[in-house]
Amino acid sequence: MAATPPTAEARALLDRAAQAGVHRLAILTPFAVGRVNCWLIDDEPLTLLDTGPNSGKALDAVERALADHGRRVEDLERIVVSHQHMDHEGLVEILARRSGAEVCAIALLAPWLARFGDEMEADDVFGAQMMLRHGLPHDVVRVLRAVSAAFRGWGAPATVTRELYHGGTLDFAARTLRVWHRPGHSPTDTVLHDEEAGLLLAADHLIHHISSNPLLTRPRDGEGGARPRALMIYLESMAATRAMEGVEVVLPGHGEPFTDPAGLLDERVRMHERRAAKIAGLVRHEPRTAYELGQALWGNVAVTQAYLCLSEVLGHVDLLLDRGEIVEEDAGEGVVRFSAA
C-alpha cells in the first residue's frame, strides 16, 4: 500500500527535521493505524528511534529506507525504543544483532521486552478478565484472545543494553536529547526532546490526526493490585508536555509532523471532558456496563476494536468515579455496571 503523500506543510516540517539530521522512515504495519514512523538521527552515534513490526516486509522496508539516506542496517550504532507496542519494537533484536547497536529504552521497559512472550500472555489474561467484568459477551472475548495470540508474532523479545531515565539525556556529537517518561497510551511511553532544534520525538504520546488511546493495562508490582487509571495518567502526562518550552515541531509515531502542540493538547483535554460528560448523561438515564456504554457511543464496532473501545470508556468512567459523579454496582454474574451517584 502506497503512503499518502504529505501535505505541503508536512513536507516543510519534514525538511526542517531533515536539516537537523532527523529523517522519517515510514514503515507499513498490519494494524489499523497504518504506517509507523521510525526516525533516523543522522549523528554520531547513528541512531534509529523505533523499528516497525517483526516481519520480513517491514525489515525490507527499513533496509530500503536506510539506503535512501546512504545507510545500511549494519551502520546503526544505537536503537531507541519509545514504548512497548509491537509496531514500534518488533525488529529491535534483529537490527541490533546485525548492527551491534546498543539498545536503549526507559528502565521500566527493559524487563518487559526481555520477557515479551510472558508479558503479552499476562496482558491477554488480564484483558480477558476486564472484558468479561465489564459486560463483553464470552464469544467476543474468545475471538479477541485468539486474535491477540495470532498478532503476537508481530512483536518480539529484545535485550535492552542501556536503560534510560526520566529527565536524563541521550548524547550525540552534535546534539543532546532530553528523555521524558510520558505514560498513558502505554505504561512505557517515552518522548525525546531536542531543545536546540525545537523538535519533540513524541512517538504515540501525541499524534495529530487521531487521539492516542490510553489502553487498559494490568497493575505492575508496587501498584497494590489496582488497575492503573490510564486516561487519568495520560492527562497528567499531557499536562507535563503542555508545560514544556522549546517544542516547535512534533515528530509523531504515526501520521505527519505538526506544530502548535499546546493547541492540540488543549483540544484533546476538551474532547475527553466532552466524552466524560456524554457518558455521565447516558448513565443518568439507566445503569449500564462499560460494554453497553461503548455500544451507545459507537454502535457495534468491529470485534477487533472492542478492547480499544473498552479502554476508551473505562478511561472516562475513571474520571467520573474519581469526581463522585457515578458509582459502580454489581450487575450479577461477575459483571459490574455504572449508575449516577
Image (cartoon, rainbow, N blue to C red):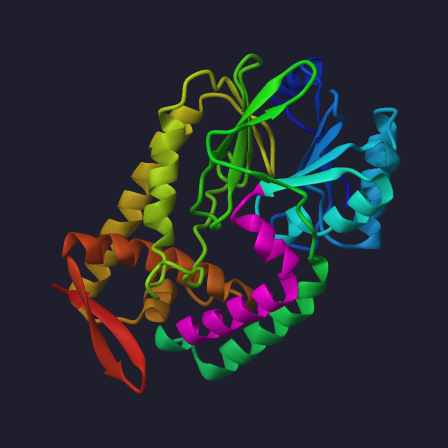
Q: Quadrant of residue 135?
A: bottom left
Relative to 96, does residue 136 appear above or below in the rendering? below
Q: For this rendering, which residue is in front, 316 or 296? A: 316
Position of 226 relative to 64 (above/below):
below
- The residue shown at (44%, 44%) is 183
Residue lying farthest to the left in this orientation:
341
Q: Identify the residue at image location x=45%, y=55%.
A: 215
Q: Is residue 219 above or below residue 41?
A: below
Magenta run includes residue 111: yes
Residue 63 relative to residue 214: left or right: right
Horizontal side of 2 relative to 214 (left or right) equals right
In magenta stretch: residue 48: no
Give the left or right position of residue 237, taking residue 199 as reference. Answer: left
Q: What percent of the width, then of the height, locates residue 30?
A: 70, 55
Closer-to-camera residue (227/263): 227
Q: Is residue 326 visible?
A: yes
User: Where does the magenta region start and end?
Assistant: 106-131
Magenta part, dominant SS: helix
Q: Tell me residue 243's x, y (percent).
A: 35, 24
Q: Position of residue 131 (x, y in %)?
A: 42, 72
Q: Is residue 209 visible?
A: no
| Nearer-the-camera pick, 71 or 96 | 96
Quadrant occupied by the C terminus: bottom left
- The total of numbered circles placed on residues is 0
User: What residue is at 85 percent from the left and 37 percent from the top?
Assistant: 73
Q: Position of residue 311 (x, y in %)?
A: 41, 59
